[in-house]
Amino acid sequence: MNYLRSLAILITGLCTLSLFPAWHNSAPATAATGAWLVGQTPREGRLVEISVHSQAMDRDISLQVLRPPNTALPAPTLYLLNGAGGGEDAANWLGQTDAAAFFADKHVNIVIPMEGAFSYYTDWQNDDPGLAEHLGNNGRNMWATFLTKELPPVIDATFGTTGKNALAGISMAGTSVLDLTIQAPDLYRAAAAYSGCAMTSDPWGMAFVKTVVQLGKGDAENMWGPYDGDGWRAHDPYVQADRLPRIPMYISSGTGLPGRFDSLDNARLDNDNRKLVNQMLVGGLIETVTNYCTGKLSDRLRALGRTDITVNQRPAGTHSWGYWQTDLHQSWPMLAGAIGL
């Protein structure tokens, strides 16, 4: 992500609201919803690239799947969501973290959608021409339907899973993870949200969501309807916290202050001082916002007596991949236990 560009757009959004490859053919696995496997291509190691047709979005969706060491035995599934870029850019789980190596000895399928940029992985009320032009698709975003209804049966049939699922995501998708568990309370056995803003219908939250969608030239009112309307409150995990399913969850954020990955020792920064400054300034600002949201949600969860939800507010750390890799490692024992590992 270009943090300087993001900062300019973030400030604009806050001010506006008066706030601060070719597929190998394979036998198609078809879901009852009408979704089906278009094709799959084995890649290096245990990586398989697949394409699944979504009837709800009327297009094929690209995904990456990390298979377990022993594919002869059924394995559970962790759905791992990318951030605002949806995996359509270099900012994705396999490109920025050790996920492939980390899961190499673990008996689990890791499913990573490689599309969904700026969509909040939710069902949009209207097609969006801005996103369509920017991303080169039809502008139809029905991601909650795809992720919770269309995709799981295809994954289960194609890879012979146990049917036990968990969900995790970062940044934009950290918000989505919480919302998706509310929309599909029986689908996931555990969830983890890293550096997401759980508040989407208060002025700060709306400004943040609007900013993310505008990065893709989209109109957030096409997503949940008019600002400050019922659609925004319906998808606000803070407002809807009493509807979060009774499953183990891990929710994390940093304060935005520089931490262990905010130095040129971080190989992701390529020894580039400009990247470091961007990560510290804009990544710090963004994480300050998500930390505010996380703190408010933590208070609400405490009031609701949700002792099954772990909230990890780190004393330092920006909005960046080093911390999310650490979060994945730290939350994995909880996720693994919930899906039978």
Image (spheres, rainbow, N blue to C red):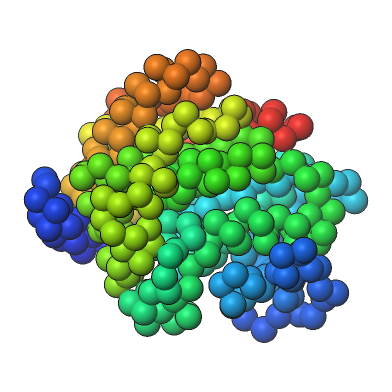
Q: Is residue 134 visible?
A: no
Among all residues in the image, which is located at the extreme right? 72
Please name the residue shown 90% across and 51% down the image: 72
Please name the residue shown 76% across and 32% down the image: 340
Q: Is residue 312 visible?
A: yes
Q: Is residue 150 above or below residue 177?
A: below
Front-most of residues 311 and 126: 126
Please name the residue shown 54% across and 30% down the image: 249
Point out the image quarter for the N terminus. Answer: bottom left
Please name the residue shown 14% across and 53% down the image: 17
User: Where, by quadrant of the figure, is residue 64 drawn?
Assistant: bottom right
Percent from the top left, x then y, of residue 109? 72, 50
Among all residues in the image, which is located at the extreme front? 230
Residue 243 placement, left or right of 288 = right
Q: Is residue 241 above or below residue 182?
A: above
Point out the image quarter for the C terminus. Answer: top right
Q: Is residue 249 above or below residue 115?
A: above
Percent from the top left, x then y, of residue 231? 38, 52
User: Where, by quadrant of the figure, is residue 165 drawn?
Assistant: top right
| Total numbered labels placed on residues in the image | 0
Residue 249 placement, left or right of 208 = right
Front-most of residues 168 and 240: 240
Percent from the top left, x then y, of residue 73? 88, 46
